[in-house]
Image (cartoon, grey):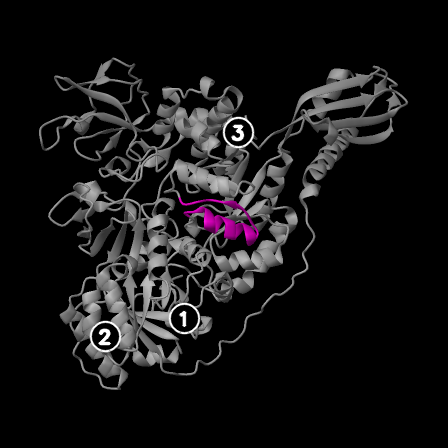
């Protein structure tokens, strides 16, 4: 078989880290006190995390740190000092989302391995190649990629490690592209504060209700051979909010079956269904799915009935008010009787063997509204949890040692120890010669007993040889000191090679006062839903140009509109797909080639598309949409170096933060329904059937807020829009104060009459006249005033 595959476990706490490593994980990923995508995990403070780095190194394992959020400029000033202690301690890698953070860390900490987070929405090999040139050594591609796509990336960048999520929760949205939590409640997923709106119930207008945005958890044990042969170097387990028993048992299972495949190949690989059942008993969300490795999307991947732990079925109605156990049930198992959805939790108070019958206690014996009895599910298995914790989470992590104590009368007392199987790591500590015993000599078994007292040091002797002549006396105090010094020397030998000196910082930009922006006229661009709308606005003097979706621009009508715009002195940018997957590249590349020279530029919404534009040497300007985040100066610099000519202001910064960032090279969206999610799933397919026709579906949440889902069939993804548009068109003074390069009005659902009313109102306001012609309708200011944490 090929080289060993890393089992990478989540660790929301030091306790969880220890359990996962003891269960067989090769590495863990943890967050510190700041800048991690799980702000609500039990993240360790600096002292605890520094100690954790040493612990994993003593065991010959690794710790990666999450710095996978978007940072504001003021936080960038604090990043160096925050990471420096961990860098010096020997941190094994940092997982990063923000392109600005990536830039700064590469410059500040040249010996620190950089991992591109799945939050970067990496969907293809071209961005992997670019990131490699930027110093990234490992990528975590989007969870939506198939095995074929993962293999294709590996074939193009063989010397770059690929880390793939194999178990745990899936986001409904492409990671890094979700603004729903941010817009609903100000808790940004890009800042580690996701409120999980995808786990809430929604109703489709005139149709199905349920947890329509809640994917089942993934379990890829059966896919281990395929993943290994696709070139995956690290199997990643999701779950930094999960408990120690979860991280331990899942890590143990993936270690077990990965080793099975590596040792026996496909012919000897078989997953025991009982092990899958144990994982489901511990935690599953509506059952498990195989994720996206073998399928693009579908209702079988969604847990529409329940967004949390489903449990496992342990009982079913047997008639006469009784139930039959289909699994062994313990007295303290937490059970639910399901009629439709969740029932109330209870314990039987007695054990029942598989096949035995039982009745429910008290009110739990009541029937549902339908009069039918439901199946019994176990939602907590205390015995499984206890067994897992006793096996993997009891005490400190253990580094097993071999040793040799020499205690001969008249010769130096010495202790040599080394990690089991690693004699090249031997350390030896010696004391003064052993005194001849005047009365009773220290027996060999007494010497061994005392040396083995390693306490909570994290070390334990697997094999300890005692070389003694039975004539000497060794005080207990001396033995204790010898053992402590030897263990400390071993600790130092195991951790010292990872230590780094403080790097020479090439540049460390300090906090600069924001320059007072100079008010200046800005250009207006209009993003169109179709070419017909564009012809209605083409003669507007305030419009500098338009954006037209690539699928529309590629048509004869679209090309005719672009030519007409040029005759009217307007520019037209072609807006390329929100997501670019390998199977779509021939179509998109064909559109780019056909429109190159006709279009004035391109609006790219992901970095893979920018890479394609550069490879094709497309002419015109390259504009980054707001989906390509530029939350800080370093990110802006990185994007421009990558090839962006102009950027779009992030939707999550408020007016003050935008002013501090500087908008002279940015475009600001001043009207439009923001895209809150980009998903490989399809609401139409989940609730009805795939029609292969673009449609708009209205969703309503439990508070009766509306959202709109549109299926983009050409790329097979969904766009979920906020139910109300952002409207800043009446804040012309505030906008002018930002000194933006241009403003954008985005039309999505509006008919030509509504478009005209809004543009007329904006035109009047630009002339200093408050017309009030567009005062009706609900709207939001987005984050322009309130911002996010």
- Give the farthest residue toward the bottom: 768
Q: Residues within 10 Å of mark 1 (few under 14, many from 20)?
A: many
Q: CA distance from mark 2 to mark 1?
A: 23 Å
User: Going by the image, does 180 lie left or right of 224?
Assistant: left
Is disc 3 placed on a helix, strand or loop? loop
Left or right: residue 538 compared with residue 188: left
**Range of the magenta residues?**
123-142
Mark sitting earlier along the chain (1/3): 3
Q: Are marks 1 and 3 in contact (CB under 8 Å)?
A: no
Q: Do we see residue 14 in this rendering?
A: no
Residue 135 within the segment the image draws in magenta: yes
Look at discs 2 and 3 and give the one toward the viewer.
Answer: 2
Q: Nearer the viewer, residue 714 or 320?
A: 714
Q: Which is more toward the observer, 639 or 575?
A: 575
Q: Kindly identify which residue carries mark 3.
A: 24
The residue identified by callout 2 is 538
Residue 530, position in %: x, y? 21, 63
**Between discs 2 and 3, the one toward the N terminus:** 3
For residue 583, above or below residue 231 = below
Q: Residues within 10 Å of mark 2 (few under 14, many from 20)?
A: many
**162 relative position to 503: left or right:** left
Give coordinates of residue 739: x percent, y percent. Answer: 40, 78
Find numbered disc 2 in the image and state the secondary structure of the residue it sits on.
Answer: loop
**What distance separates the C-alpha of mark 2 from that of mark 3?**
64 Å
Vertical arrangement, residue 463 with respect to residue 579, above or below: above
What number of labels is visible? 3
Say what secondary structure mark 1 lies in.
strand
Q: Position of residue 110 (x, y in %)?
A: 63, 53
Please give the label number shown on residue 666.
Answer: 1
């Amino acid at each position: 078989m090929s080289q060993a595959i890393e089992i990478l476990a989540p660790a929301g706490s030091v306790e969880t880290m220890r359990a996962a490593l003891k269960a067989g994980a090769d590495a863990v990923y943890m967050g510190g006190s700041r800048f991690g995508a799980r702000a609500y995990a039990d993240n360790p403070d600096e002292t605890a995390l520094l100690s954790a780095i040493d612990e994993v190194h003593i065991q010959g394992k690794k710790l990666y740190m999450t710095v996978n959020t978007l940072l504001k400029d003021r936080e960038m000033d604090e990043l160096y000092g925050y990471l420096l202690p961990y860098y010096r301690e020997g941190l094994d890698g940092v997982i990063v989302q923000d392109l600005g953070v990536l830039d700064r860390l590469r410059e500040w900490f040249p010996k620190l391995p950089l991992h591109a987070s799945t939050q970067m929405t990496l969907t293809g090999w071209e961005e992997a190649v670019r990131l490699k040139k930027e110093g990234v050594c490992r990528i975590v591609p989007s969870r939506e990629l198939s095995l074929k796509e993962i293999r294709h990336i590996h074939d193009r960048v063989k010397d770059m490690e690929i880390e793939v999520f194999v178990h745990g929760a899936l986001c409904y949205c492409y990671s890094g592209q979700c603004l729903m939590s941010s817009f609903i409640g100000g808790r940004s997923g890009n800042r580690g504060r996701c409120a999980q709106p995808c786990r809430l119930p929604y109703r489709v207008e005139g149709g199905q209700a349920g947890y329509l945005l809640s994917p089942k958890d993934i379990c890829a044990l059966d896919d281990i051979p395929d993943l290994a042969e696709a070139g995956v170097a690290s199997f990643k387990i999701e779950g930094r909010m999960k408990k120690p028993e979860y991280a331990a048992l899942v890590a143990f299972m993936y270690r077990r079956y990965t080793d099975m495949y590596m040792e026996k190949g496909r012919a000897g690989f078989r997953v025991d269904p009982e092990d899958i059942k144990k994982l489901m008993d511990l935690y599953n969300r509506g059952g498990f799915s195989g994720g996206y490795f073998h399928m693009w999307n579908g209702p079988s991947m969604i847990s529409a009935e329940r967004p949390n732990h489903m449990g496992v079925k342990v009982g079913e109605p047997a008639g006469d008010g009784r139930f039959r156990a289909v699994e062994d049930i313990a007295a303290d198992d937490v059970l639910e009787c399901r009629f439709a959805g969740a029932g109330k939790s209870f314990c039987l108070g007695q054990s029942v063997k598989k096949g035995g019958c039982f009745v429910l206690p008290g009110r739990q014996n009541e029937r549902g509204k339908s009069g039918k009895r439901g199946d019994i599910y176990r939602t907590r298995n205390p015995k499984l949890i206890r067994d897992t914790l006793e096996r993997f989470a009891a005490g400190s992590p253990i580094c097993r040692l071999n040793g040799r104590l020499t205690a001969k009368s008249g010769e130096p007392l010495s202790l040599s120890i080394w990690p089991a199987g690693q004699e090249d790591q031997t350390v030896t500590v010696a004391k003064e010669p052993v005194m001849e015993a005047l009365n009773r000599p220290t027996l060999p078994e007494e010497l061994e007993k005392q040396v083995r007292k390693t306490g909570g040091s994290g070390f334990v002797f697997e094999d300890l040889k005692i070389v003694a002549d039975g004539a000497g006396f060794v005080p207990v105090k001396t033995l204790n000191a010898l053992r402590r010094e030897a263990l400390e020397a071993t600790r130092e030998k195991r951790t010292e090679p990872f230590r780094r000196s403080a790097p020479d910082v090439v540049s460390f930009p300090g906090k600069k006062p924001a320059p007072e922006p100079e008010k200046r006229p800005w250009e207006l661009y209009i993003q169109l839903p179709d070419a017909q709308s564009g012809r209605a606005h083409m003669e507007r003097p305030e419009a500098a140009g338009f954006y037209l979706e690539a699928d529309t621009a590629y048509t004869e009508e679209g090309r005719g509109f672009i030519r007409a715009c040029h005759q009217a002195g307007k520019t037209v940018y072609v807006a390329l797909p929100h997501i670019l997957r390998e199977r779509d590249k021939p179509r998109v590349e064909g559109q780019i080639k056909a429109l190159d020279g006709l279009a004035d530029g391109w609006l790219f919404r992901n970095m893979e598309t920018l890479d394609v534009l550069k490879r094709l040497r497309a002419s015109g300007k390259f504009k980054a949409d707001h989906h390509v985040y530029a939350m800080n100066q370093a990110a802006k610099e990185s994007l421009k170096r990558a090839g962006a000519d102009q950027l779009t202001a992030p939707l999550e910064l408020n007016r003050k933060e935008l002013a501090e960032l500087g908008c002279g090279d940015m475009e600001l969206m001043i009207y439009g329904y923001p895209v809150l999610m980009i998903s490989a799933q399809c609401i139409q397919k989940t609730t009805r059937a795939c029609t292969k026709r673009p449609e708009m579906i209205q969703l309503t949440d439990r508070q009766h807020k509306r959202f709109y889902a549109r299926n983009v069939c050409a790329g097979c993804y969904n766009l979920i829009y906020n139910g109300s548009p952002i409207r800043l068109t009446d804040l012309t003074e505030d906008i002018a104060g930002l000194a933006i390069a241009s403003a954008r009005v985005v039309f999505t659902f509006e008919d030509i009459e509504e478009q005209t009313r809004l543009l007329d109102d904006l035109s009047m306001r630009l002339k200093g006249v408050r017309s009030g012609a567009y005062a009706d309708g609900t709207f939001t200011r987005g984050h322009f005033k309130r911002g996010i944490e």
